Amino acid sequence: MEGYKNTGLDKIAKSYDKAIDLGRQGIDPYENLPDYIKNNPNYLIYKDMQENETLSDSGRKEIVEFLNPQQDMKCIDLGCCLNLMFRGYKEWESIYYGVDISPKTIELLKQFIEKNCLQIGALHCGSMHNTPFDDSFFDIGTCIGSLEYFRKEFVGQVLCEIYRIMKSKGKFVLDIPNAGSPEFEITALIEEYLGRPDEFDMTVSEFESMLSFGFEISKKEVVGPMIQYFLICKK
């Protein structure tokens, strides 16, 4: 993690590594939150989002419908977390490639793949702003629940990397915080408590201006604390 200290990636990796360790012990880090969070007036909003599954979700049917995964497609999942295990990605017909900064997340995914005899493309432990894949390699992709941890400069690097590895007219879904909303304020408070504070420092218009160099916005939707963008690569 030495090379990641200036971007905060080391902090994020350690936080998710800890979450994997707790999960192996049967402990949910989102349970037993401290009183200052539970007493926050927006906490009930968070509980409602949990119960109704309206937190930003990488497994939404709208994502699958837009990407339309097919057998001859390569799919990149940046900041993949455990989407392959819990968000239905293992059911997609496309060839799965995952990137995550947490070594223990990648280790757990490899164990899951081996146990379930799954065929995938590859898993890579590293940063999503500098991946090992060839130019114009992927047909479809996602980056859900990841960009909120980073500031403008790093987000720009990630978008350039997405543009580099996506094919012409490739489809991609990503999300950013719905900053200022009570839904995001409470989730940001919880994420900070878990050791991975949200650093996103752009307005929606600034982000969309940054997108415009290489992506067409097909549609966007507010999903819980986040705004999901459905993009087409303009190569």
Image (tube, rainbow, N blue to C red):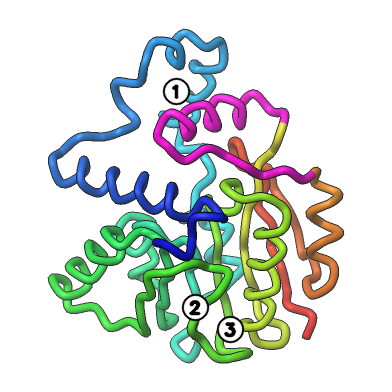
Q: Is tag 2's residue or tag 1's residue first in the polypeptide sequence?
A: 1
Identify residue type, mark 2: Cys
Q: Residue at x 15, y 46 (%)?
A: 24
Task: State the residue position of label 2.
Answer: 75
Which residues fall within the magenta stretch?
180-202
Residue 204, image x and y in percent? 80, 46
Q: Residue 184: within the magenta? A: yes
Task: State the residue position of label 1.
Answer: 47
Does 163 sit left or right of 34 as displayed? right
Q: Is tag 3's residue or tag 1's residue first in the polypeptide sequence?
A: 1
Where, quadrant-wise, is the C terminus in this rendering?
Answer: bottom right
Q: Secondary structure at mark 2?
A: strand
Q: Is tag 3's residue or tag 2's residue first in the polypeptide sequence?
A: 2
Q: Residue 16: within the magenta? A: no
Q: Residues within 10 Å of mark 1 (few under 14, many from 20)?
A: few
72 up-or-down from 19: above or below: below
Locate residue 198: give its quadrant. top right
Task: State the residue position of label 3.
Answer: 139
Identify residue type, mark 3: Asp
